[in-house]
Image (cartoon, rainbow, N blue to C red):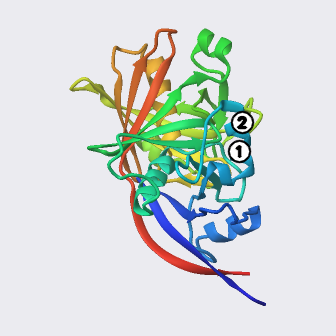
Amino acid sequence: MATTPLTFTKAQATGNDFVMIADATGSQKLDAALVEKLCDRHMGVGADGLIRAVPAHQDTEAGRMLAETGLTSSAEAPLWFMDYRNADGSIAEMCGNGVRAFAHFLINQEAVDPDAESIPVLTRAGIKTVRQVSEGYAVGMGVWSFIDPEMAADSASDSLVQTPGQNDPRPALSISMGNPHTVVALPNEQALENLDLHTPPKVEPNPPQGTNVEFVVPADPLIENGEGRVRMRVHERGVGETMSCGTGACAAAAAVRVWAAGDGVDTWRVAVPGGEVTIRFTSREDGAEDVELAGPAELVYTGELLTE
């Protein structure tokens, strides 16, 4: 059977790793089986997800988003669409670590101006703006919100989460970062280390599209030099446990701020197995808060894979 070489780049951002594919003409077709094959750590390249970089005007789905928002994309000035898939082939809204890796990939591919003050990226969760900073790349993640505002406001929790080995389910708070997250506080680092995340945590009630589950332990002290600090592990829907999750780190910091009554702290360091990211909150006039995620991104290698 004839095979066609597929050029790819492996990228990682605090250990969250991705197969990156450049598709300037919008001709690369992806289905769940191909994505799952590429992301398989034994039979493929191995990754937490796959990201296809395609000009928005060259992609049907992105074209619909352009029409709905009034944004523009052309051959002379392309707006790049981040077509993100989970490792199991399912479609995802976006990925905070993936956006940083995506911007780094675009610069490496000479698809955008490396000296630009900011790089706009179209995602299924809207436009995200990336800029280069001392930590690597900072991404404007938009506004965080409660998935269930009424319940969260009443009790600072809206669900229960059960993991293997736990005697009782723990209360949790569900937060949207354009994709769903459920954050669970644990009493100490030993409890965090002992988690078995091979099996998806059971969340009740479960958000309609499923949810990523973050387990966090506040540092002691929680605030140091004017910055909040927490540690986190995460089980991502459609993937399993990953070394990092950018939107999950944002959700974790937001939840801890709720539980700590804000404490007047707007900058948070979130330690994950793959490194550390920085989360910054900025208040808006309408009372909501914008979130920025900053951290490193790296291209690991480029190669060709033969696909049937």
- In the rendered image, the quadrant that contains the C terminus is bottom right
Q: Are marks 2 and 1 in contact (CB under 8 Å)?
A: yes
Q: Residue at x 71, y 36 (%)?
A: 67
> Which of the 4 quarters of the picture holds residue 169?
top right
Rendered view: 295 above or below 142: below
User: Disc 2 marks which amino acid?
Assistant: Ala
> Which of the 4 quarters of the picture holds residue 160?
top right
User: Disc 1 marks which amino acid?
Assistant: Gly
- Element on which disc 2 rests: helix
Q: Residues within 10 Å of mark 2 (few under 14, many from 20)?
A: few
Rendered view: 78 above or below 278: below
Q: Is residue 134 left or right of residue 293?
A: left
Q: Residues within 10 Å of mark 1 (few under 14, many from 20)?
A: some
- In the rendered image, the quadrant that contains the N terminus is bottom right
Frontmost residue, 72 versus 299: 72
Frontmost residue, 23 versus 245: 23
Q: Position of residue 167 (x, y in %)?
A: 63, 38
Residue position for label 1: 63
Q: Residue furthest bottom?
A: 1
Q: Residue at x 56, y 53 (%)?
A: 241
Q: Residue furthest front?
A: 76
Q: Residue at x 69, y 38 (%)?
A: 65
Residue position for label 2: 67
